[in-house]
Image (tube, grey):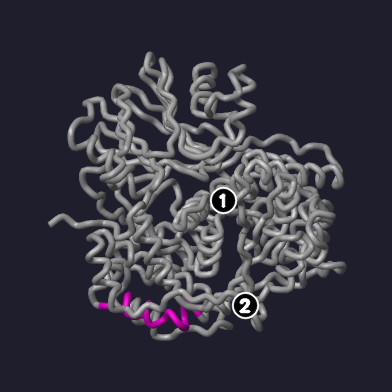
Amino acid sequence: MAASWRSEPGSAAVAVAGILDRRGVEGAHIDRLKAAVGDASRPGTVLRLDALTVAVSDGVAIHDHGRFVCCLLGTLLNAPALTARLGLPSETSPAAAIAAAYECDGTAVLDGLRGSFLLVLWDRRARTGLLAQDQLAARAWFLHSAGAALTFASEIPPLLDALATRPAPDVTGVVRWLTSRALPDGVTPYGNVRRLQVGQAVAVSQDDWRPFTAWAPVYRSPAPVERGEAAELVRDGVRRAVDARLSPDGRTAILLSGGFDSGTLAGVAAPLQRERGELLPAYSSVFPGEPYDESPSIETLTSELDLPSTRLRIHPQGSLTRALRFQRRWEMPQPAPGSITDQPLIQHAAADGATVIFDGQGGDELFSYSPFLIADHLVRLRLLAAYRLCSRYPGVGSKLELRHVRVILKRWGGRAALPYGLHRRLIERRRNEAGGRPEAAWLSDAALHAYEPVDLWAWKREFDGPRWWAYHASALTTARDQSGMQDFLRRRAQLDGLESRSPLMADVDLVELMLRLPPELAFDPNVDRALARESMRGIVPEAVRVPAPAKSDYSSFMHRTLAGADLDGFRRLLLNPRAEVRAFTRPDALADHFGRVPTASDRDWATWGHRTWALATTELWLQAQHGVEQLARATDGLGLPEPSTEVVAAWRS
């Protein structure tokens, strides 16, 4: 009997899947494509475009008239501006406008599109086309190549359903997930399956396909602006990004912590919503009596900004249950246990009628200073400028001490100033002198052969420009892409039927703005994200805009979850002699890992927690490759605690 793979239906309610094969696609291939994007009652619609065959579900916009064809999944935010530029009637659909722009501009059409979307474009006369996505890959194509055929889909589940056979695990992808929970270069745990990377598109024709770079940040000398003008530019940029992403039906909600980033979105979005005659409901996790509880800041934000507020007390349990649900739905391991605090909020927002969810993810990278400006000064022998920048380094306060200078120059100056090739050779030499790869000594020999440490200095070679700019550009594009955060935010929201829109993560105009502002404006000895905080004066309440003494640290909550309530489940899953992750670890590694569970104050707690999560989610994924029945057998006897929450305050529309 054939294995079934998912226990949760509707794994991709709105989806696109397709095959490019010059030999043609018939019979069983067509049936698989229809099933991949639909179900028995509503199979997908199939478009036959020469060698390209595309199936789309309900909810995917299609323009198929004449020479040019466009399929659009997602949201095109600047559709009215595009329609006006082309001189088309105002009622022209976004898919028809994109097709018309493609006719005029070819691949350059992608430069002017804004939003979160996937595109299939085809020129019937030329028999060529594009698979495209938004610049920052808030949505991304997943590709499988086998011989002459390219199979593609808008998510992993429909891609797997479109294939004749399930891909075997890719050892390199599994090992990368185990060791870093990052998937660089578009790799996935599935053999021959790649995620199209940030800034990329795929050119397709009758006979061939090739990925190419459709967008990438380009260095330009910083705009000659003073602090006040720069703050105004940031404020306007955030406002445009937020305004464009508010749901047109008014049903936008926000995940609100007590921090600056979500406070920024709330401060900007709330008055924009009121102009539309709508409220901005806020959903928050609270932890009464705990040192990391942000209830006072949440109260300040919701009262001063007049936000309807729902607050849930989250109990430290159920992380593995959440990971199991994520695996069953998305056929991928869940990147982090943090959804234990966020998923209940999303569920409540969905029950209250929200369709779009905001959160403050991405603000740390977007608004942060770029410390390697110090290295740029050293490279140019501007020693006094480097020293002065040290005196403005965030956190040093009003008195710069010599020990501060030494630490700052060593960490952000000397090593970063080295050319990439020389720096890389020095790293390899130190690793060899230390006896190889001690950080991965717990891996099996086979896994160690596939292991490659994360290159923390790759940004030096990825982008042409000063070091401060290259690092910041990488943080806002490549590093985010490799972390999988965009995919996680999208999938987390879609688990409960919402659309994730993160203005600080996915707005290309805001990213390009932050990359062209003078980098020294972000330095302040007393605050982090100084320029962004200045930009929000009068918008975010002062108690939140001005930084608290220390950022809330949820490590003790996660310790009580992973090393407390959920620990027995992790042990039963991973210490089982039939655990498949054992093939990737040394014989005694798992027993050693659980032999001593560190306390929350131990220095190695974070390493233990990250490894526990990576091992467990990898095991769930490996078991799922044998079918949902096998996954059930591996998890049914674990006695996993269910997530538990308690409503502290509730708002209903």
The image quadrant that residue 575 belongs to is bottom left
**Which label belongs to residue 356?**
1
Q: Give, as a single range, the part of the protein colored magenta.
A: 561-576
Check disc 2 and report the residue beneath it: 287
- When the figure is inspected, residue 322 is found, relative to residue 500, above or below; the finding is below
Question: Dividing the image into 4 quarters, which one contains the N terminus?
Answer: bottom left
Nearer the viewer's eye, disc 2 or disc 1? 1
**Which label belongs to residue 5?**
none
Q: For this view, does 280 lie left or right of residue 638?
A: right
Residue at 47% from the left image edge and 54% from the top image edge: 497
Q: For this view, does 353 lie left or right of residue 61?
A: right
The image quadrant that residue 627 belongs to is bottom left
129, 598: nearer the viewer: 129
Three-letter amino acid code at the position of disc 1: Val
Residue at 21% from the left image edge and 26% from the top image edge: 23
Is residue 416 in the magenta section?
no
212, 440: nearer the viewer: 212
The Cα–Cα distance between marks 2 and 1, rounded to whole angstroms, is: 25 Å
Residue 431 seen in the current view: yes
Three-letter amino acid code at the position of disc 2: Phe
- When the figure is inspected, residue 630 is found, relative to residue 70, above or below; the finding is below
Outermost residue toward the top?
125
